[in-house]
């Protein structure tokens, strides 16, 4: 398994950040590797979301997203051709009028990827992804 965890402060409220992170179908607008994102099924408190991502080639996978309003979005792997396991969460906490986010991902790839390479793949995109979320906050909320 490859794990990644990071914590950052975003210049917005937890409610504002929650709106961004739970608006899955808008991901292709600001996350360059996400080519398509569709909510396939919605149930109280959770959604089945299908992601199409481009990492060397296109891959599809489905995650069950569990939403705790303005506090947490977590996910568990349902199916797909990139991962055997993909579990994680966004934890949102108010801190001085801003939002402290904690992002965690635990992934196991479907293809054979040696441990150190899998860990690098999971961690290498993290700074770029966080930068994309900072830009999205600024774009939507001017902060």
Image (spheres, rainbow, N blue to C red):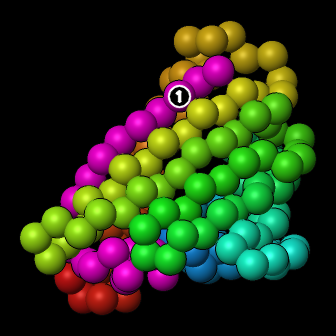
Q: Secondary structure at mark 1?
A: strand
Residue for point 37% across, 83% down: 16
Residue with the mark numbered 1: 3
Residue pictured at 10% horizontal, 70% vertical: 96
Residue 112 location (% of width, % of height): 81, 16
The total of numbered circles placed on residues is: 1
Q: Quadrant of the N terminus?
A: top right
Q: Give x and y (percent) for residue 86.
A: 70, 40
Judge by depth and name the residue closer to the eye, 143 or 43: 43
Visible residue check, residue 4: yes
- The quarter holding residue 65 reads bottom right
Residue 21 at what x, y percent from top left?
Answer: 51, 70
In this rendering, is residue 139 above or below 103? below
Q: Residues within 10 Å of mark 1 (few under 14, many from 20)?
A: some
In the displayed structure image, the side of residue 28 where residue 39 appears, left or right:
right
Q: Is residue 110 above or below residue 105?
A: above
Residue 109 horizontal side relative to residue 66, left or right: right
The C terminus, quarter of image: bottom left
- The answer, for residue 31, to whether it is visible in the render is no
Residues in magenta, as a range: 1-19
> Quick one: 23 or 70, which is closer to the camera?
70
Give the residue displayed 76% in from the left and 59% down from the top.
Answer: 64
Left or right: 38 as drawn, with respect to 4 = right
Question: What residue sits 53% from the left and 28% below the top?
Answer: 3
Is 122 drawn above or below residue 46 in the view shown? above
Q: Is residue 74 magenta?
A: no
| Residue found at the very far bottom of the displayed protein | 141
The picture quadrant where one finds residue 135 is: bottom left
Asked whether 6 falls inside the magenta stretch, the response is yes
């Amino acid at each position: 398994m490859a794990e990644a965890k990071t914590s950052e402060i975003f210049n917005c409220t937890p409610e504002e950040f929650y709106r961004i992170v739970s608006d899955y179908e808008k991901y292709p607008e600001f996350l360059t590797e996400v080519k398509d994102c569709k909510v396939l099924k919605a149930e109280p408190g959770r959604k089945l979301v299908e992601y199409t991502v481009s990492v060397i080639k296109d891959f599809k996978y489905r995650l069950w997203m569990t939403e705790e309003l303005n506090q947490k979005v977590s996910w568990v792997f349902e199916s797909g051709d990139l991962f055997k396991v993909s579990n994680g969460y966004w934890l949102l906490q108010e801190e001085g009028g801003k939002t402290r986010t904690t992002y965690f991902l635990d992934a196991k790839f479907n293809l054979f990827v040696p441990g150190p390479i899998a860990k690098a793949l999971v961690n290498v995109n993290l700074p770029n992804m966080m930068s994309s979320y900072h830009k999205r906050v600024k774009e939507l909320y001017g902060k």
